[in-house]
Amino acid sequence: MTRLTLAVGLPGAGKSTWFARQGIKPVSRDTINELLTGYPHDQSAQDEVTALLIQVVGARLSRGMDTYVDATNTVARARRRFVAVAELHRVPIRALLFDTLGETCLARNEQRTVGKVPEAAMLRIMTMFERPTLAEGFDEILIAEQSGYRPQTFQLDNMESSISTTS
Ligand SMILES: Nc1ncnc2c1ncn2[C@@H]1O[C@H](COP(=O)(O)OP(=O)(O)OP(=O)(O)O)[C@@H](O)[C@H]1O
Ligand SMILES: [Mg+2]
């Protein structure tokens, strides 16, 4: 099924790990960043990286490819253009929320050797974080199930059935 699924989660929330464990190959912002700048975590070309990311996503959707995006997408403004590209191609769009506690993300970030985000930037991103809402234009909001790396998602508005499927 062709649809667009957008990861939403702080740095260190476990997005890339989750995709790898699921065997899903997302369009990764880091990959595009590396293609453009030579380094996955170079911050010098953010606007161009965003433009390329949107272009790749749009091209995939027009080819009918089911598409996941691995990027933080922590504010509605960053998500808006993905909603627009999904609408343009008339495909459903889902937010996949990585609901990892901020303190866990901070601790994991501290342990990182590559891709470590400066602590002040982490705190800023945490302060500005906006949970995705249906009002932004998402057809569904899913929460990534990460305990024991179990590759499952469940719907936010249907917690009861989700608990039975994960037990
Ligand atoms: N479910 C988990 N349990 C324990 N550790 C985890 C889990 N998921 C990820 N990690 C660890 O947390 C760190 C960050 O994970 P990952 O790189 O997947 O985060 P990310 O959300 O992709 O971050 P970024 O936005 O910076 O790319 C890694 O060291 C990873 O091994
Ligand atoms: Mg990642």
Image: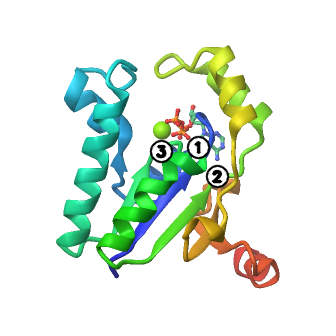
**Residue 109's quadrant in the figure?**
top right
Ligand 1 quarter of the rendering: top right
Q: Point out residue 63 in the picture as x, y percentages from the top left corner.
A: 17, 72
Compute the Cα span from label 1 to label 3: 6 Å
Q: Point out residue 108 in the picture as x, y percentages from the top left corner.
A: 66, 28
Q: Nearer the viewer, residue 153 or 36?
A: 36
Q: Is residue 146 left or right of residue 63?
A: right
Q: Amino acid at mark 3?
A: Ser
Q: Amino acid at mark 1?
A: Gly
Mark 1, Cα crowd under 10 Å, few <14 / some 14-19 / many 20+, is some
Image quadrant occupied by the C terminus: bottom right
Q: Mark 1–mark 3 contact, CB under 8 Å? A: yes
Q: Look at mark 3 in the image and give the residue it sits on.
A: 16
Q: Residue at x 24, y 22 (%)?
A: 37
The image's mark for residue 98 is 2
Q: Look at mark 1 in the image and give the residue it sits on.
A: 14
Compute the Cα span from label 3 to label 2: 11 Å
Q: Mark 3–mark 2 contact, CB under 8 Å? A: no
Q: Point out residue 103 in the picture as x, y percentages from the top left corner.
A: 79, 31
Ligand 2 under 8 Å from disc 3 Cβ: yes
Farthest-out residue, right: 160
Ligand 1 under 8 Å from disc 1 Cβ: yes
Q: Residue at x 41, y 58 (%)?
A: 82
Of the image marks 3 and 2, the number of the one nearer the N terminus: 3
Ligand 1 under 8 Å from disc 2 Cβ: yes
The image's mark for residue 118 is none
